[in-house]
Image: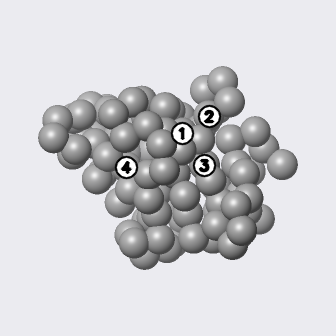
């Protein structure tokens, strides 16, 4: 199991480090014990958080309502909950 993924019941928690204001949205790789994700939206009035949730949902193939921020709403380091089992998340992220 990777250090940034953790099962919680039927869901999976993902620790992410977000870089807002990037040229494009993309998963970069590991950043310490988190998955680094670049987001094109700026961190203004929740735009980067909304773009992050949209990007993660699209990347993992789940509805937008299947991804939520558990911790770190105003921080670059966040913990997301995704309505997918850990193995499915790891496979879709390419481990």
Crowd rating for badge 4 (residues with CA inside 10 Å; few <14, some 14–19, many 20+): many
Above-or-below relation of 43 to 93: above
Residue at the image position 39 percent from the left and 72 percent from the top = 65
Disc 1 on helix, strand or loop? strand
Closer to viewer: mark 3 or mark 4: 3
Kindly identify which numbered label has been placed on residue 52. 4
Q: Is residue 70 visible?
A: yes
**55 sits to left or right of 60:** left
Residue of label 1? 16
Question: What's the CA distance linking mark 3 and mark 4?
Answer: 12 Å
Percent x, y of residue 9: 71, 68
Percent x, y of residue 63: 43, 75
Contact between marks 1 and 2 (CB within 8 A): the answer is yes
Contact between marks 1 and 3 (CB within 8 A): the answer is yes
Residue at the image position 59 percent from the left and 41 percent from the top = 15
**71 sits to left or right of 88:** left
Percent x, y of residue 27: 51, 43
Crowd rating for badge 1 (residues with CA inside 10 Å; few <14, some 14–19, many 20+): many
Question: What's the CA distance linking mark 1 and mark 2?
Answer: 5 Å
- Most extreme residue toward the top is 32
Kindly identify which numbered label has been placed on residue 14. 3
Disc 3 on helix, strand or loop? strand
**31 sits to left or right of 41:** right
Residue at the image position 48 percent from the left and 50 percent from the top = 70
């Amino acid at each position: 199991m990777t250090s940034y993924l953790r099962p919680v019941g039927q869901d999976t928690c993902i620790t992410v480090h977000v870089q807002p204001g990037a040229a494009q949205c993309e998963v970069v790789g590991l950043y310490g014990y988190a998955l680094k994700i670049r987001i094109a939206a700026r961190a203004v009035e929740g735009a980067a958080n909304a773009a992050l949730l949209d990007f993660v949902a699209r990347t993992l193939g789940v509805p937008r309502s299947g991804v939520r921020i558990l911790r770190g709403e105003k921080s670059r380091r966040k913990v997301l909950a995704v309505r997918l089992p850990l193995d499915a998340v790891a496979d879709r992220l390419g481990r």
